[in-house]
Image: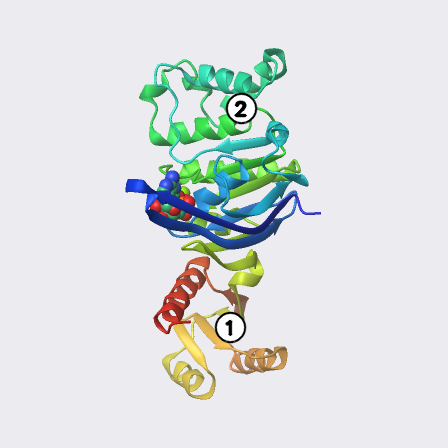
Amino acid sequence: MALIEINKLTKEYSSGIFKRRKVLALSDVSLNIEAGNIFGLLGPNGAGKTTLVKVLLGIAFPTKGAAKIFGKNVKNHRIKKQIGYLPENHRYPGYLNGEEVLNYFGLLSGMKYKDFKDRIDELLSLVGLEKWKKMKIGKYSKGMMQRLGLAQSIINNPEIVFLDEPTDGVDPIGRKEIRDILLDLKNKGKTVFLNSHLLSEIELVCDRVAILNKGFMIKEGNINDITAVSDRYSFLTSDIGDDFINKLLLNYNAVIRSKNNIIFEAENIEKLNLIIDYLRKENIFIHGINREKDTLENMFINLIEQQKQQHLNGN
Ligand SMILES: Nc1ncnc2c1ncn2[C@@H]1O[C@H](COP(=O)(O)OP(=O)(O)O)[C@@H](O)[C@H]1O
Ligand SMILES: [Mg+2]
C-alpha cells in the first residue's frame, strides 16, 4: 500500500459574481507516493500544485475523486497529527519572535509543551536561526521566514511533510541548506512532498517527480528515468588538433564542445568501444566518459510544448 494514494482527483473552483467563473485546477489526477521518498511536484504557476496539496491536507475539497494518506481518507482529521505543512507564502504575526512561533505551532499541533520544548532549540539551530530566535519575525528576511516555516512544519515530528515552494526567496546557500535538511529527513525514514516551480532544485533532491500542467498530470516517474538520454556520451580527452577534429566530424556523429570535450552518439556499447579504440589509436588520452542526461528543464519545456501542440491540433 502506498503512503499517499490519489485517485482520479478533479477540483473545479467557482468564483466571481454568482460563482459563474469556473477554473479547472485539477483534472482526473491519479498518483501513488511511497514512504521514505522525496517526491517533487513540478509545474508552472497556476498548474494546480497548491490545490493538490490542499486537497491532500483536507483544506480544499475535491469536486470528484478521493485521496488517502496512511490508508485513510484525507477527510479523517486524526491523520493530521502525523503530517507537517509549510504553506506557500505563509505569514505569522510579526510581533512574535522565532521561538514564540515554534512554541505556538507546537501547541497548535496538539502536543504537550514538555514533549516539544527541547525540539524548539534543536530545530532553530537546524535551520540556522538560533541567533535570531528572540528577534521579532516582522524583521526577518524572506529567506529567514522560509527557514522558520520549515522548522514549524516539522515541530510535531511528522511522518510526512508537505512543503509548498520552500525555497522561494531563499539565496543559493540557504537553498543548499534546505536541501540538506530534506535529505536528512529522508534518511530518518520520513516522506517529503515538495511543490516547486524551480526545476533545478527538484532535480537535486527528489527521487520521483510528477509534472502538472493546467491541472493535468503530464508525466510521472523516477527522476533518472525521466531525464536519461540513452545514446549520447560526453568524452573528456587530452587536447585534439584541428585536423583530427575534422576527421571526427566527418566519420563519427560527433559534437565538438571544445578541444577536449566531445559528444558522440553511440547506439550501443560496441559502437562506444569502437570510438574509444579509435581515439586511443590516435594517441588521444581519455580522461573520462559520461552518459549525457537531459536536464529536467529541457524535458519539462519539451513536454509543455508538446501539450500546447496537441491542444492546437485539437487532440
Ligand atoms: N480559491 C480559489 N478560487 C478560485 N480559483 C483558484 C483558487 N485557488 C486557485 N485557483 C486557480 O486554480 C488554478 C491552480 O492554482 P494553484 O493550485 O494555486 O496552482 P500552482 O500552485 O501550481 O501555482 C489557478 O488557475 C488558480 O488561479
Ligand atoms: Mg502554488
Q: Residues within 10 Å of mark 2 (few under 14, many from 20)?
A: many
**Where does the image place residue 181, in percent across and percent down from the top left?**
54, 35
Classify 276 as above or below 11: below
**Where does the image place residue 238, in percent across and percent down from the top left?**
47, 70
Classify 275 as above or below 113: below
Q: Disc 2 designates what residue?
A: 123
Q: Is residue 137 visible?
A: yes
Give the residue displayed 31% in from the left and 41% down from the top: 18
Name the quarter showing ligand 2.
top left
Judged by depth in the image, the label closer to the viewer, 1 or 2, is 2
Q: Residue furthest top?
A: 114
Q: Secondary structure at mark 1?
A: strand
Q: Residues within 10 Å of mark 1 (few under 14, many from 20)?
A: some
Q: Decide which of 257, 300 is in the foreground and name it.
A: 300
Q: Disc 1 designates what residue?
A: 232
Which corner quadrant holds the C terminus?
bottom left
Give the residue displayed 54% in from the left and 78% down from the top: 266
Q: Amino acid at mark 1?
A: Arg
Q: Decide which of 282, 18 is in the foreground and name it.
A: 18
Q: Is residue 68 left or right of residue 126?
A: right
Q: Is residue 45 visible?
A: no
* Mark before the other along the chain sequence, 1 or 2: 2
